[in-house]
Amino acid sequence: HNKYEREIRRLSAEIESLKNPQNLSASPHLDGLREENARLKYRLNILKRSLQDERSHCTKYMMNINQQLQEIFGEAIRASCPELDNPPLAVTPNQQAKFGDYQCNSAMRCIRPLYTEIIISFIYYMLFLSHFFFLSSGFINIHLKRTFVSKLLSNLLVNGVQPPPLASRKKVVVDFSSPNIAKEMHVGHLRSTIIGDSMCRLFEFLGYDVLRLNHVGDWGTQFGMLIAHLQDKFPNYLDVCPPISDLQAFYKESKKRFDEEEDFKRRAYQCVVKLQSKEPDFIKAWNLICDVSRKEFQKVYSCLDIQIIERGESFYQDMMTAVVKEFEEKGLVELDEGRKIVFAPGQSIPLTIVKSDGGYTYDTSDLAALRQRIFDEKADVIIYVTDSGQGTHFQVVFAAAQMIGWYDPQVTRVEHAGFGVVLGEDKKKFKTRSGDTVRLMDLLDEGLKRSMDKLKEKDRDKVLTLEELTKAQTSVAFGCIKYADLSHNRINDYVFSFDKMLDDRGNTAAYLLYAFTRIRSIARLANIDDATLRKAAETTEVLLDHEKEWKLGKCILRFPEILQKILDDLLLHTLCDYLYELATTFTEFYDSCYCVEKDRQTGEVVKVNMWRMLLCEATAAIMAKGFDILGINPVQRM
């Protein structure tokens, strides 16, 4: 502190002397002195900021180093290039270690020597920069101080994996999963469910207020035929709960009758009218059908550890009249052959908000849902996780909502996070051999079977208790299914293959889970308990002298910037790639650096390199939090 304070006093005195008119008039180099004055001010500001950071920075949280560098360079470039509107700002990790740890190439467009000199002088005094080079190409390469990285690793070990604090706690609504009542969940719902849940976990970890919504298809004309079929098949349904064991078969039966029997079709339409009028007997029939579906959905959600609140289309029914009225009052509705349609700016396809028969549509329902989420939930971020085929629909809905003034995209983030389809190993749409859609529960059961086969193949059944084996089975099965989905760019289609996802080589959950278990076992095999590790975290410096220690330490600390990137683009495969890089970087470290040294003859532990044990612990802590965000549940032994 004293060093910085002395430097601040010296610079302040020099600035004051340069302000003195007598000094200025005596100087033949007035412009040069002004530039020197400006440069000194920049140095003074950064020193003050460094001193403030030293005194008040809360070490409880992990630091996003990339973000810190962007702020520093952004401040420097704005100060040195005041005539530039929105000056370019790009700070990235360096791909080649010999050129430093991070790289800023923003100076390439502010290349005048004075600017680059000022940028360098401005950032020179930052505490965590040891040195940097300004290259002729306009790149600035940044080398982090090893003591700084070591300090951050110690903070992580003492305080746990804590994300940087939010400036304000925002409300996030994520609409995901969304199966249809009376239809079984299939692989399309699997993608939405897994991706949506992981997005929620990320927002929750970062401190947002998250509302997880299941917008199920629980309203519409199909309920007329289901209720009519229910009345025929179980006439005493009002008194005795109907034993519908296979709702999918029940749906197919009613659909067949609807298509082939004119009288049944007429009765189905009458049932729809009575349901929409909310006649008690028909509401009860509707609830019975919905409850059967909910129980089936819950089996899937329980397997995958999914928490979600159901708010189906029925929730928004009473809001739709007001939505249509609002569009009409603002003169945004056109008539088209009896339909009421809305054209949004820049969209070639209109929304149909009222059908020619007076009924509402998915467009009306989605507008009502969006309005409710903006005004009632007061959401700052709203994300829809559905297949990419619905992208155009949501684009038009969002455009209409902006047109009517419900939200400003600069203030409220409303986004469709689309995803590709699941393919079979033949690269065609994933179906059963008979051509039917794959039932989700069948898929999960098959995963459990394959997982147990893999564990037995590795003789894990001979060393694990039955309870441990069962935990490992579910962890590997469901972890591999989730990871196989999340490790692919969600925008693309991906091939579903149990063989690939259960392979314990390469970027798979099986490899990462085994790696994590191995890391967790190092301390146990060295007979080091948690209390010893906790004390060491507070008292032992994490040395980073070996190149593999240094590489691992820096990789661990990139976690917050990885999460920030996903927050920006909602592409979760970035986290999977990072965890795989972390695991392989750890393996390099472990192969090169002895954590525990043993007597070759007796196998007895003769030396524990505690700072390396702490690197193991820090790696495991980040991996565990990464797994948690992906919805994967690792086990202690596998």
Image (spheres, helix red, strand yellow):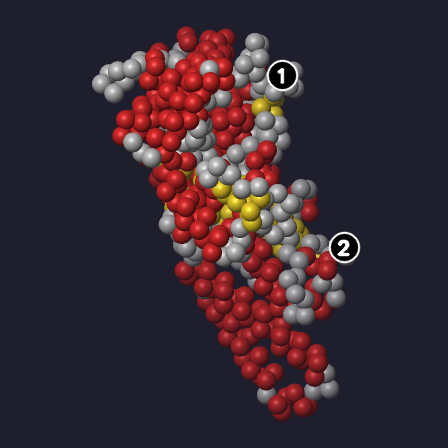
Q: Are marks 2 and 1 in contact (CB under 8 Å)?
A: no
**Quadrant of image for the C terminus:** top left
Query: What kind of residue is marked 2?
Result: Ser
- Look at 43% across and 23% down and name the residue there: 266
Query: Could you tell which of marks 2 and 1 lies nearer the N-terminus?
Result: 2
**Quadrant of image for the N terminus:** bottom left
**Residue 75 is at least partly visible in this image:** yes
Rendered location of residue 563, percent (x, y): 51, 42
- Look at 50% across and 31% down and name the residue there: 192
- Look at 76% across and 55% down and name the residue there: 137
- Look at 54% across and 69% down and name the residue there: 45
Q: Is residue 636 left or right of residue 37?
A: left
Mark 2 residue element? loop
Query: What kind of residue is marked 1?
Result: Glu
Quadrant assignment, res 494: top right
Nearest to the eye among marks 2 and 1: give it. 1
Q: Which residue is mark 2?
A: 137
Rendered location of residue 550, percent (x, y): 57, 40
Q: Which residue is mark 1?
A: 425
427 or 38, nearer to the observer: 427
1 or 355, nearer to the observer: 355
Q: Is residue 129 left or right of residue 360?
A: right
Crowding around mark 1 (Cα neighbors within 10 Å: few <14, some 14 to 19, many 20+) is few
Rendered location of residue 537, percent (x, y): 40, 41
